Structure formats: C-alpha cells, structure tokens
Amino acid sequence: MIEPIVKCSAGLDVHRDIVVCTILKELSDGSLHKQTREYSTFRQQLKQLAQWLEENEVALAVMESTGIYWKAVYEEIEDVGVRVIVVNAQHIKKVPGRKTDVADSEWLAELARCGLLRASFIPPKDLRELRLLTRYRIKISGYLSSEKNRLHKVLDDSGIRLGSVVSHIDGVSAHRMIDSLIEGKKSPQEIAQLALGQLRSKERDLQLSLDGRLSDRHRDLLRRISRHIKWLNAEIADIDAQVVAAMQPYKQEWQLLQTLPGIDSIGAAMLLAEIGIDMSQFGNKERLCSWAGMSPGNNESAGKKKVAEPPKETST
C-alpha cells in the first residue's frame, strides 16, 4: 500500500459549466474525511470554491488539462495561495488501480494525496497573459500569408505576372506598383518606373509582367486585399511593440536568446512566452523538446521520417 504524502488534497473535475471538487483530509486520529461539492463556472462561484479549499487548508489541488476550461479555475485557486497543479489526462489513465465506481474528482484527490502525479508546465500569470498576444500574432501572421497568396492569384488571374519578376510581392516597389495598378491611370511603362533600387535594372521585364487584362472587378478585389494586408501589418506591428515592452522583466533571458542563430527579438519573446525562464520545471532537455513538439514522432527517427519497408515475398 502506498503511503500518503499529502495530508489534505483536492481533486477537481472541470467541465464547461460545472466543477466537481472532492477534498480528502486526513484527521488527527488517522481516519480519512471526504467532502464533495459542485460549483458553477461563474467567477463568483469559483471564488467560493477557492475559499473553500483555503479554509480546509488544502495542501495540493489537482485538475486535468481539459480544453481551456481549467484556466479560470486555476487562476482563482492560485490567487488564494493554494498550491494547484494541472496534469495530463493521458498520464492519469496510465496510473494503475482505478476503480470504475470512484468519481473523477475523488480519484484525482487520491492520486494527489499519494504523490503519483507529475505537474504539467504552467507559466507564471504574466507570461500566460503574454501568450494570448503572441499566439494571436501567429494567427494574424497566418491570415497575412493567406492574403498575400490571394493577391498573387488575383494578379495571375488578370494576366499580370509581377510575382515572376519581383522577389517579394510585399516589398516597397511591389506595393507602389500594385497601388498604381489599382488606381488604373498609368500604363505598364509608367508603372514599371516606380521600381526602386536594383529592381530598376529589370524595367523591361517589369513592363511585360504588368501588361495584363485588369478589369474593374480585379481592381476592386485588389483594393480590398491590399487594404486588409496593410491593416494586418499594422496589427502585427502594434502587437510587436507590446510584446517588446513586456520583455523588460525578462531582459537578460530575452537578450540571451537573441544570440542564437535565427532568433530575433520577437522570436525570442515568443519563445519566452511559451517556455518561461525556469528550465528546471521541465526536468531535462528531452522533456523540454517533447513539450515544445520538437522530438521525433512515432514515424520519425532523429528527425528523419521512416520509410515503410515493402512486404517481403514469401514462397508458396
């Protein structure tokens, strides 16, 4: 029998609308007292849940990392100073000895009481909030890439092959020429002269690439896409400014990460938002790589995909 190491533990079964909490408390005579309560996920109810845990002097509260519903519960419990951890649901399933008639919250409390759970990495509150910005930036960057591809397609649809001549369709010269195409008042020869720098040496090719059948509907769509691209770029720039400002408490780690090849100031900030500054929480480098999704999958070996071997021929 496993000797309990936590005198008072709590297990929380978190759902979208309710949280079922079980407290297991070892009394002075050695007996075990169990209490189970159900709370809604409105903030006032979650505050009451946190206060209940605090009043019972819970040493460790545990919940599974189900969706995003655990986050609000976690923050309320964290605020009252009760130690709370989030665990991987797959790890729970691998712990032997579970009985079908035991409620999820009670089972979590029992595992916590016996010290059989490994906490998932949860960054500090400041970095958790910063993650909201950095992950939104990733989403917006995806939209931006999609809009640039759409811009290419509309130009190609009209017979304009600007993308075949310029290396970056979102460069300054390309923007100047696309804006002029949308305006529709200049000839391909005049638009080609808007090129800057080394691109001016390709003036003849630019003239040929800009000669297409650009209809009013093409121009209207290009205007909308171009406006959206500019808005997305402005949003990303605004987010970047906020992310850089948020790096002041982590300035040393942030600057250190920028010494790595391929990591700029924004990349370093986004990395810090994901993994934090305390690497000891991962235990070792292998766990850090696994958490970051950098470890080889089941179909890979040392970063190389395995190729299935053809079936061997059998003689009959």
Image: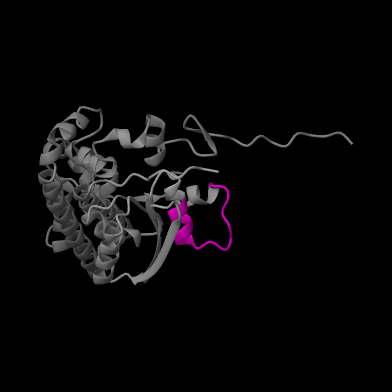
- The residue positioned 48% from the left and 61% from the top of the image is 104
The reply to whether residue 173 is visible in this rendering is yes
Closer to the camera in the image, 299 or 285 = 285
Give the answer, above or below, for where 301 lies relative to 30. Answer: above
Q: Which residues are magenta?
A: 95-110
- The residue positioned 59% from the left and 35% from the top of the image is 307
Give the answer, above or below, for where 297 lies relative to 149. Answer: above
Position in image of residue 184 (x %, y %): 15, 63
Closer to the camera in the image, 77 or 181 = 77
Give the answer, above or below, for where 43 lies relative to 210. Answer: below
Specify whether 150 is left or right of 93: left
Position in image of residue 111 (x %, y %): 46, 50
Give the answer, above or below, for where 4 lies relative to 13. Answer: above
Q: Residue furthest right?
A: 316
Position in image of residue 167 (x %, y %): 25, 41
Closer to the camera in the image, 203 or 36 = 36
Q: Indicate whether residue 146 is drawn in magenta.
A: no
The reply to whether residue 211 is visible in this rendering is no
**Total numbered labels:** 0
Specify whether 20 is left or right of 208: right
- The residue positioned 12% from the left and 62% from the top of the image is 185
Viewport quadrant of the N terminus: top right
Position in image of residue 164 (x %, y %): 29, 45
Residue 231 in which image quadrant: bottom left
Specify whether 35 is left or right of 316: left
Closer to the camera in the image, 244 or 192 = 244
